[in-house]
Image (cartoon, rainbow, N blue to C red):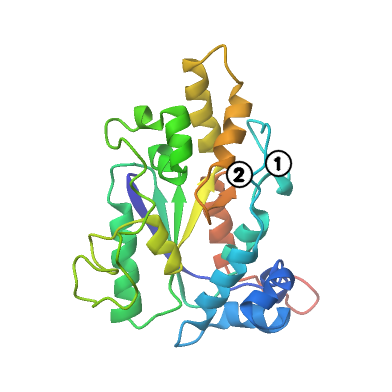
Amino acid sequence: MSGRIMPEFHVTTSRRAALGFLGASAVIAGASPARAGDTIRSGSSSGEALRALKASLAAAPRRRSFKTVPFMVTRPDEWDHEAAQLVLSYGPRTIQMWESTDLGAPWLNLMREALNGQVFAHKNPDFLPVAAVHGSAHLTLFDQAAWDMYALSSLSGGKATANKFVSAKPGTTPSDDLQDLGGYYGPQNNNIQTLQERGAAFIACHDSIHAIARTLQTKRPTGPSADMIAADLTNHLVEGSILVPSVVAFLAELQRAASPTPKPTEGGRT
């Protein structure tokens, strides 16, 4: 489970679900809410649906001003439910979910390879890779300030002294040659920032955050509570990440979104 790839889903969804947050993001997406919803669901050979999703995700709120958070969150205002719903409502062609648990596993490299193959070889520019991040891999989703404040390198098992997983390689741009190993699309540029620019979504896990906070709290028993540390860690999530209550629960939500809704038969029964 170090970087396990989940099955590919062909996601279909209802018009109502797809429009859950699009009313607030239609200006950025450049369309009316209804048309933006149609774009996200239907896609096109030019990657129009993925561009609309990226714009909508950029407009969706992220909750990063917590003072304390409980062990188990139960209310939508305790996570990024609008952004999560946009991912669940994305319908064009393929969504590939990566369950990323090991900080040292090559999951960022494999996501890059999947993107390259889907976009350039299989001609699927609306391809959406989604990283469901938990376990030690979740350390990648905290900014460097959090790494410094909480000495998160001590939880990395010696695999990292700083968060080297976020920033793009300097000087790389989307105009780089596809065959350049050190370029934008190459294996020397495996990072969260570039993958986000290319449309990947990174799902942060509240359960993992609280577990990390509890570990940190045992090292500072006279300091802040685990609930307070978890809140602060949440406030230091990498920009663009999407907080959900539990990534393993989110996997189930994605599977449910991928399952076609049974059509009622005559008499109203399914």
Q: Which residue is mark 1?
A: 74
Residue at 67% in and 31% down: 68
Observer able to see residue 206 = no
User: What kind of element bears circle 1?
Assistant: loop
Label 1 sits on what residue type?
A: Thr
Does dot 2 land on a helix, a strand or a loop? Answer: loop
Along the line of sight, which residue is nearer the eye, 242 or 58? 58
Q: Relative to residue 48, is residue 220 depicted above or below?
A: above
Give the CA separation, mark 1 to mark 2: 8 Å
Residue 237 in the image: state x and y as whole percent: 52, 45
- Above or below 6: residue 231: above
For image coordinates 50% across by 37% down, the residue present is: 208
Residue designated by label 2: 245
Quarter of the image for residue 189 reads bottom left
Which residue in the rendered view is the most extreme toward the top? 222
Q: Amino acid at mark 2?
A: Pro
Check the picture and name the quadrant holding the C terminus. Answer: bottom right
Quadrant of the snapshot with the N terminus: top left
Query: At 58% across and 77% down in the image, what residue appears?
Result: 40
User: Quick one: label 1 or label 2, which is nearer the N terminus?
Assistant: 1
Image coordinates of residue 117 in percent, x first then y, are 29, 73
Q: Are marks 1 and 2 in contact (CB under 8 Å)?
A: yes
Q: Position of residue 226 (x, y in %)?
A: 58, 24
**Left or right placement of residue 235 versus residue 50 in this view:** right
The local crowd at label 1, few if under 14, some if 14 to 19, many if 20 or more residues have their Cα within 10 Å, is: few
Give whichever of 258, 202 is nearer the camera.
202
